[in-house]
Amino acid sequence: MNDTLIIGAGPAGLTAAYELSKLGCHSTILEAGEQVGGLSRTVNYQGFRFDIGGHRFFSKVAYINELWNEILSQDFLSRSRLSRILYRGHFFDYPIKAFDALSGLGPVETFLICLSYAKAKIFPQPNETNFEQWVSNRFGYRLYEIFFKTYTEKVWGMPCTEISADWAAQRIKNLSLGEALRNAVFGNGNTGNGEIITTLIDQFKYPRLGPGMMWERCEELLAQQGKKTLLCASVNQICHRNARVECVKVKRGSDAWDEFSAEHFISTMPLRNLIHALEPPPPDDVLKAASLLRYRDYLTVVLILNRQEVFPDNWIYIHSPEVRMGRIQNYKNWSMDMVPNPRQTSLGLEYFLWAHDDEWNWSDERLIDLGIRECVQLALIDPKEVQDGVVVRAKKAYPIYDAVYQQCLMTIKSYLNRFSNLQTIGRNGLHRYNNQDHSMLTGVYAARNIVGEFHDVWAVNTEKEYHEESLGPETKPNDRLTPAVSEPVATTKSLSQQVG
C-alpha cells in the first residue's frame, strides 16, 4: 500500500509528491495523459517546443521560488516581459498604461473616455457582482468596452455580465486615469502618499526548454527516489467507506481494472469529475452542484514560419473583434531554445472554445488554414512564410467563475470536508483560476497536512489584490510556510549532471 496516492501530474500534484519526498513519505502519481505537466507541459513537434498557453515563473511566495531553483538550477532563465494589445491595427502596452492607451486612440476617443471615466467616478455602480461592473467602475465603461470586453468574452465565451467580479480583482491591474495623472505629477509608480507600487511582471523566470522542462525534471528526481508516476492512468472510480477513501480504480481495456490503495489521497482532478467518480455516489445536491461547474476549453494552432523575426513580444492579446483568435505566443521570445533553427519562428495562435463548438472538431488542416488567414488579416505574416503547422487541444483548461460557481463550491466543499484522508488541490481541484505558484502552494500545504501540520488549501489565492503586484521593493513575500524541513530531493550537483 502507498503512503499517499496523488491523482494528476501537473504542477500541484508533482509538487505535492516532491514535498512528501522531502518529508520522508512515499507517494505514487496517477496521470491520465501521456506526459507530465498538465497545462504547464511543453509539447515538442519536430524540435519546435511550445506551451499550452504561456507560463511565466514568478511568485510572491519565497518557498515556491526556492523549489523552482532547486529543481531546475541553471536551466532557469531570467526573461524580460513584453506583451501588448492589438486593437484596430494599433499596438498598446499591456498591462495598460493610461497615457499610452489615450495617445494611441486619438483626441476624440480620449475625450469620450475621460467623460466616461468621470461618470464612473461620480456615479459608480454600487454592487460589483460581475466583471463588467468591476472594470467599468475603475476604468469607465468606454475604456472597458475597448480594452476588456471583446477579449474577455473571447476567452470565456459568455457576456461579461455573467462573469463574476472575483476573477477581475486578481487578474487586472487597478490602473485608473486618476493614477495616470498622479504619475505625471509624482513620477511613475508613486501614489503620492509615499508608497511605491512595484510589479513582479516586468521580469520573470522561464525554463530553457519551456515549462514542461520543470515538471519533467521533477518527475525524474522523484523516480530516482523510487516515487513512481504512472502515465495514461485515468481514474474512473474513487471508492470510499466511513468517510475515508479506500482505493481508486483505473480502467484498462473493456473489462480490466487496476486498483490502487493508500492511506492518504490527493486529487487534482476537476471537481466535477471527482464528484461523479465517487463510489458510492454523493447526495443529489452535491452531484447537481458538481454538474453546474463549467470549464472553458482551449486549443493552440502552431504555425512554423521561415522568418527570423516576426514581432518582439512574448505574446500579444488580440482585441480585434473581427477574428476568433484570442492571443498569439511567440515561443522563441520566451527562450531561443524553443526553436531548433534561429532563422525560423513558431507562433502559437490561441483559440478559446467549448468542446461542443464546431471549430473544436475541425480537422487540424482546417484550423491551420483559419490561423493563417487570421494572421494575414491582422497583417502579421505573409502566408508564403508558413512552412508547417500543428494543433494541440486542452479540455477543461479554465474553470469558469459564473453566477453560480461560489454556491456550488460551498456545497461540494462541505461534502468533501467529511473525508479524513482526501484533499483536493490545484486549479481544477479547487475550481480556482490559479497560477502555477498558487497550485504548487496547495500541493505543499497538502503534503505538510499529511505529516501533521494544519493548512487550509482552499485559502490559497483568495486575497482580494492584483496577484502580480505588491507595495514596496522591500515587501516580504506572502509566505505563510514554515522553513524547509529536509534536504532537496536532489543536490545541485546531481541536477547539473542530469542536464547533460
Image (tube, helix red, strand yellow):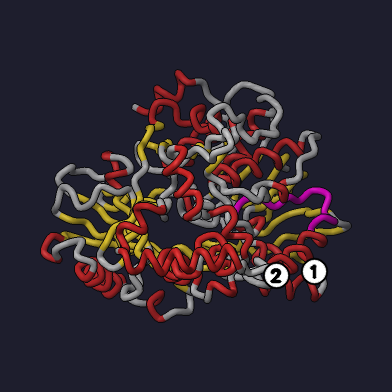
Measuring 64% from the left and 28% from the top, which residue is drawn there? Answer: 22
In the rendered structure, the answer to whether residue 237 lies left or right of residue 368 reads right
| Observer-nearest of 312 and 345 | 312
SS at mark 2 in the image: helix
Q: Residue 4 in the image: x percent, y percent?
A: 70, 42
Q: Is residue 317 visible?
A: yes
Q: Quadrant of residue 302?
A: bottom left
Question: Which mark lies nearer to you, 1 or 2?
Answer: 2
The residues colored magenta run: 416-427
Measuring 66% from the left and 56% from the top, which residue is drawn there? Answer: 430
Q: In the image, is residue 385 part of the stretch drawn in magenta?
A: no
Q: Residue 233 in the image: x percent, y percent?
A: 56, 56
Badge 1 local density, few (<14 within 10 Å), some, or many (20+)?
some
Q: Is residue 301 above or below residue 199?
A: below
Q: Which residue is mark 2?
A: 290
Quadrant location of the C terminus in the rendered image: top left
